[in-house]
Amino acid sequence: MVNRQFILAARPEGMIRETDFRLVESTVPPLREGEMLVRARYLSVDPYMRGRMSAARSYAPSVDIGQVMTGGGVGEVVESRQAAFRIGDIVNFQMGWQEYAISHGENVRKVDASLAPISTAVGILGMPGLTAYYGVTEICAVKPGETFVVSGAAGAVGSAAGQIASIRGAHAVGITGGQKKVDYILRELGFHEAIDYKANPDITSALRDACPHRVDAYFDNVGGATTDAVLAYLNTFARVGICGQISQANDGAPSPGPRMYRHLLVARARVQGFLIWDFTRQEEALVDLANWIASGDLRYHEDVIEGFENMPKALIGLFLGENIGKRVVRVA
Amino acid sequence: MVNRQFILAARPEGMIRETDFRLVESTVPPLREGEMLVRARYLSVDPYMRGRMSAARSYAPSVDIGQVMTGGGVGEVVESRQAAFRIGDIVNFQMGWQEYAISHGENVRKVDASLAPISTAVGILGMPGLTAYYGVTEICAVKPGETFVVSGAAGAVGSAAGQIASIRGAHAVGITGGQKKVDYILRELGFHEAIDYKANPDITSALRDACPHRVDAYFDNVGGATTDAVLAYLNTFARVGICGQISQANDGAPSPGPRMYRHLLVARARVQGFLIWDFTRQEEALVDLANWIASGDLRYHEDVIEGFENMPKALIGLFLGENIGKRVVRVA
């Protein structure tokens, strides 16, 4: 059986290019005892992937040149010599950018297709949804009546984070770029306020309007000048979760900005970088998320790109801000 | 009875000048019921005072022009119409920059002169010592075997912080300026390593030498480029306490530096501004500190400036790095 795979062909300098990947074909080897073969149905593209393409120090090893690009996916078991999985099971794991993946069953999650479309296993009921959940509830520790700000508010993580903060009783303010995304988070997701950083480059002044009582909790997906502005406008004992830095993703060295240490001292604020890996007991969080989806309190949008061959384009588009909600690639 | 007081005469622009204060004389009014009169014995000068002289937002109100400058002190009760305090009691409170202060007894701590010299009530057994204690044990949450770095390591807070981290089993590394201070923290205080930022402006490279296992906890008293360098060299799950920013104290707007958000994300590190006010149950901490002093595990040095009239000079000298240990002014 022929497998198509995207391998890392070059380390990007600055913005990712399609030529940083190469599409190759290989033959799927026969399964050994304990293995199963999974056919990809949806593959995820996420901002963190930029880090894996780079040789710079990060929280996970880089993908080597010539290696299959890393990434999560949802697929169907098509052959199994693994006792815990049967043909037809829908599973979620780090499949990589390929149409078929072989797994021993470790770190593989079975997906309950009755809860929601299976693509959500890499979205609202997967890594992005869980990241939003723990970022809001544990890292930002949002309390009723507080002002919560999230950047990248129309993205997979940000759109969930604002709604979860709302569910928790906070005043949810989203920072995003463009009227379409503003309309989405205000009208479809019920954010209380939106700041369009493209229309209002003076984020400081926009924050004052949107957050008359300053900012108690900030969920950062973007970094850069947006984060500088929010950190200068924190309330006493504010909590900041650093989840992503998409505005800086294609830069090499850290960009220059005003040092924010004094702001943290004056506010006695806490800034914390976090990853979803650091949170266990994800089953409980998934129950909450599924219940909120069922009740209509938590909405999500999927931005589905058709065709495995479009993986590189789909990823590049994330950094151009093309997506509303979670971007996934449907594998034919 | 004549009282001498320093009032704030002007808000400093940049570095404090002596002319920002004015020495005035006034008559001590007669005590009312519930009041006591305290004669200053030692007055404290501390970096935080720069913030009180400025109109910029901080964690405490500014001193108004014409008002007595704020500050802590240790004094002796010389008259009392306050049932809880008797003539001869040694007390510590925010006396302000004056030879005599009247108090109702609120937020006044009685000083046990048998424990240590009474001047330590504004030093190792007072605000600076407690700040070091809680910064190391709670904010930096130092654990045995970890690498602990403190900037401003020869100052009142930093010198205590490094020793407390050592007592807690950490590898204590101090960053300070000049050979004299390096010798002090290594030879007299028993720090494991010292970095002289004046002799080695490349702090990044000095950190690599002094901290082969990166930095698990950082206690920041200075800010600026020193803090940039440490934050770029944190270990996974590192904790950073922002206690002071003396290198930036005389600046207006935040100075520019590399944005450190990505470093915090990669390390999943936590940065937290803190103030000693936010910690209660200080009696327990004082018992620990006094015991460590008695056992010889915790040493301190006092830099005593003679004469009330030298308060402004004494404060200015802090920002010139003149002091080793806690600077106090002895009031004649």
Image: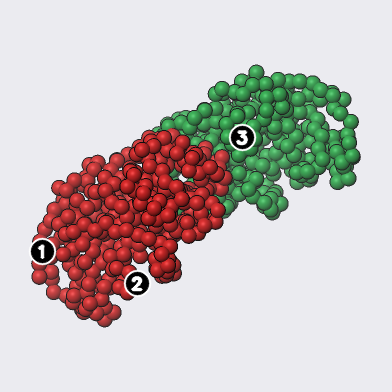
Chain colours: A green, B red
Q: Marks 3/1: CA distance? A: 66 Å
Q: What amino acid type should be assigned to the residue bearing mark 2?
A: Leu
Q: What amino acid type should be assigned to the residue bearing mark 1?
A: Ser
Q: Residue furthest bottom?
A: B83
B323 and B2: which is toward the camera: B323
At which x and y percent is residue B240? 47, 49
Query: Disc 1 marks which residue?
Result: B26
In this rendering, do the residues under marks 3 and 2 share a single chain? no
In this rendering, do the residues under marks 2 and 1 share a single chain? yes
Badge 1 element: strand
Q: Is residue A207 visible?
A: no
B168 and A182: which is toward the camera: B168
Query: Disc 2 marks which residue?
Result: B115
Residue at point 51% right, 54% down?
Answer: B170
Q: Is residue A168 visible?
A: yes
Tell me if residue B213 comes above or below residue A178 in the rendering. below
Mark 2 vs 1: CB contact within 8 A: no
Q: Marks 3/2: CA distance? A: 56 Å
